[in-house]
Amino acid sequence: MKILITDGISEKGREILEKAGIECVIQHYEPDELIQKIPKFDAILVRSATKVPKEVIEAGKNLKVIARGGAGIDNIDYKYATSKGILVLNTPNANSSSVAELVLAHIFALARFLHIANVTMRQGKWEKKKYNGIEVYGRTLGIIGFGKIGQLLAQKALALGMTVLIYDIVDIKTDLPVKKVSLDELYTQSDFISLHVPKMEKPLIDAEALKKMKKTAFLINCARGGVVDEKALLDALNKGEIAGAGLDVYEEEPTKNLDLISHPNVSATPHIGASTAEAQERVSIEIANKIVEALKK
């Protein structure tokens, strides 16, 4: 058995695969070259940097498993793969805590102007009076999508003394002291809104949704690019319809939307939600074990 690992794996994850007799080839290929190389592999392991479209799957005559080290599988043609009898694996929960913590990092950055004060300090400016922030204690956090990440975020926010409102299309049972509300109620009542939903056919957060939010509200997206209409968001920021945004994911990555990410009311990071040592290790071990189990069948 032979696996192509295009976006890296931890040493422990690699050891699990090799101990099971699976030959590991760790190499990133550009799309055209990937199509040429894939026929010799039984499995491919990717993260967010590599796309596995229909053309790659079609070329992978020996493919039995396509694995994604991470939660989403937007970069894999899941329907076509399963129609060909190829198993698609992912690790939906391994990076949950890291993503939840990044959301809090953006919340604190926006609440206390850390994102922009850090820049102006490096420019030799001392704008102490300009950065009059707010405390997160006693503020209301609205969480859209109450899966594993949403639940972990709620726990952490509650520990900070925040009120937590949640909305999900699924009626998720929880013992946490959170309040389930409608989407419109969440928009109008939240001081911070954090998104934890999969990519959709059209943006969840569009101009209409942004107009419903408080002018003092902050929007955080560490979920998926395309969930937020970036043009509408930039327009809302320029008009003062919301106070700011924390973004880790974008419609196009790497993003070319410099007007948005350089906006003084935007805290921007380059899709690093899962980029912690702990998350990388958990992801690698979990996906390696899943691949071994799948290839043994």
Image (cartoon, helix red, strand yellow):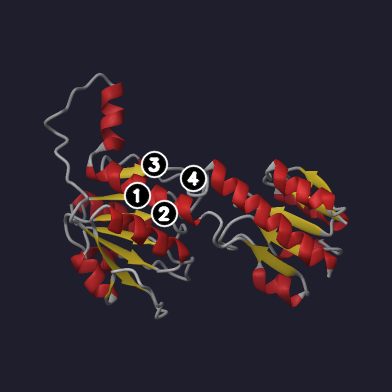
Q: What is the crowding at mark 2: few (fewer than 14 residues within 10 Å), some, or many (at least 20)? A: many
Residue 239 circle label:
none
Residue 100 circle label:
2
Say above or below: 95 vs 189: above
Disc 4 versus disc 1: nearer the observer: 1
Q: Is mark 3 on a helix, strand or loop?
A: helix
Q: Which residue is denoted by mark 4 in the rendering?
A: 272
Q: Which residue is drawn at 79% across and 52% down?
A: 17
Q: Is mark 1 on a helix, strand or loop?
A: helix
Three-letter amino acid code at disc 3? Leu
Mark 3 or mark 1: which comes first in sequence?
1
Q: What element carries label 2?
A: helix
Disc 4 versus disc 2: nearer the observer: 2
Number of callouts: 4
Say if residue 205 shows up in the picture: no
Three-letter amino acid code at disc 1? Leu
Residue 258 circle label:
3
Mark 3 or mark 2: which comes first in sequence?
2
User: Could you tell me how far apart the alpha carbons at marks 3 and 2 are, in whole angstroms?
Assistant: 25 Å
| Spot occupied by residue 138 in the image (x, y as percentages of width and height) | 17, 56
User: Could you tell me how far apart the alpha carbons at marks 3 and 4 are, in whole angstroms?
Assistant: 18 Å
In terms of depth relative to the viewer, which is nearer, 24 or 230? 24
Q: Residue at x 37, y 51 (%)?
A: 103
Three-letter amino acid code at disc 4? Ile
Three-letter amino acid code at disc 2? Ala
